[in-house]
Amino acid sequence: AQSVSQHNHHVILSEAASLELGCNYSYGGTVNLFWYVQYPGQHLQLLLKYFSGDPLVKGIKGFEAEFIKSKFSFNLRKPSVQWSDTAEYFCAVKPNQAGTALIFGKGTTLSVSS
Amino acid sequence: IAGITQAPTSQILAAGRRMTLRCTQDMRHNAMYWYRQDLGLGLRLIHYSNTAGTTGKGEVPDGYSVSRANTDDFPLTLASAVPSQTSVYFCATSPEEGVVGELFFGEGSRLTVL
């Protein structure tokens, strides 16, 4: 069965530190990849997505992610985090095949101290 | 304002009671989904509907049922609630079933079963 692994359960950073959240998936075929963010008390919002083309995608609020096909990875990065980035981050994978649903990782909680 | 409306936003329920969580969208999206979010487990798909008149089981369907009589509504019913169904439930939509996969989420319904 397909699965999505997020390596970090909880990441604690100071403001201005750099961020990288790992995400790996298990599926041999073509996939669409997503990062969602959930701010405290809110619903999930799309941060960025990759369908095809340039494997380095840029999203909102200075986030970017790089798709490395050979490593089945889609890590999220931000050069300098802010206190307002405190949230839970979910990696999600959609096999490029009709009849399959979006599969979420278990999430990574990011806490940024000011 | 276009979007997804979930009701109720919060509910405390006695075990054994029947409960229906409502989800209505006005974006005319074909696909709709119900997820539950639990600490440390991320989001897990309960049921989905690719288009009006069709439904399917997700990862954790037991104890839940859905119906999709029209495009806009996708209610989730717990026939006889149990404490393990205490969770936050998110309804989501997607413009089309298939390979794209980007989801739009409602605000969530927090359910506590005692």
Image: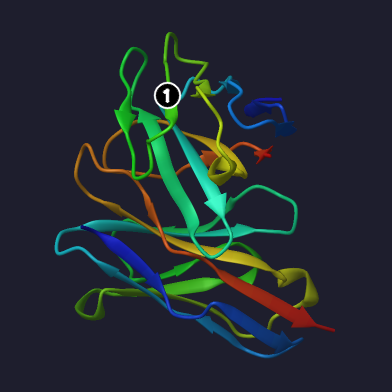
Q: Residue furthest right?
A: A114
In the picture, measured across the screen, residue A10 lies left or right of residue A25, that is right
How far across and how far down the image is residue A92, in percent? Answer: 41, 58
* Picture layout, residue B70 above or below residue A46: above
- Identify residue type, mark 1: Ser
* Picture layout, residue A72 above or below residue B80: below
How far across and how far down the image is residue B68, in percent? Answer: 42, 15
* Picture layout, residue A27 above or below residue B9: below
**Residue A26 sits in quarter:** bottom left
Chain to which the residue tagged by mark 1 belongs: B
- Assign a secondary structure to mark 1: strand
> Which residue position is annotated with label 1?
B65
Q: Quadrant of the C terminus of chain A?
A: bottom right
In the picture, measured across the screen, residue A114 lies left or right of residue B80, that is right
Of residue A39 and residue B98, the one placed in the foreground of this image is A39
Q: Residue at x 39, y 33 (%)?
A: B47
Q: Residue at x 62, y 44 (%)?
A: B88
Q: What scheme was used to colour the molecule?
A: rainbow
* Picture layout, residue A78 above or below residue B64: below
Q: Is residue B22 visible?
A: no
Of residue A6 and residue B40, the one placed in the foreground of this image is B40
Task: Sort mark 1 into few (<14), some (14-19) or many (20+) by Cα contacts within 10 Å.
Answer: some
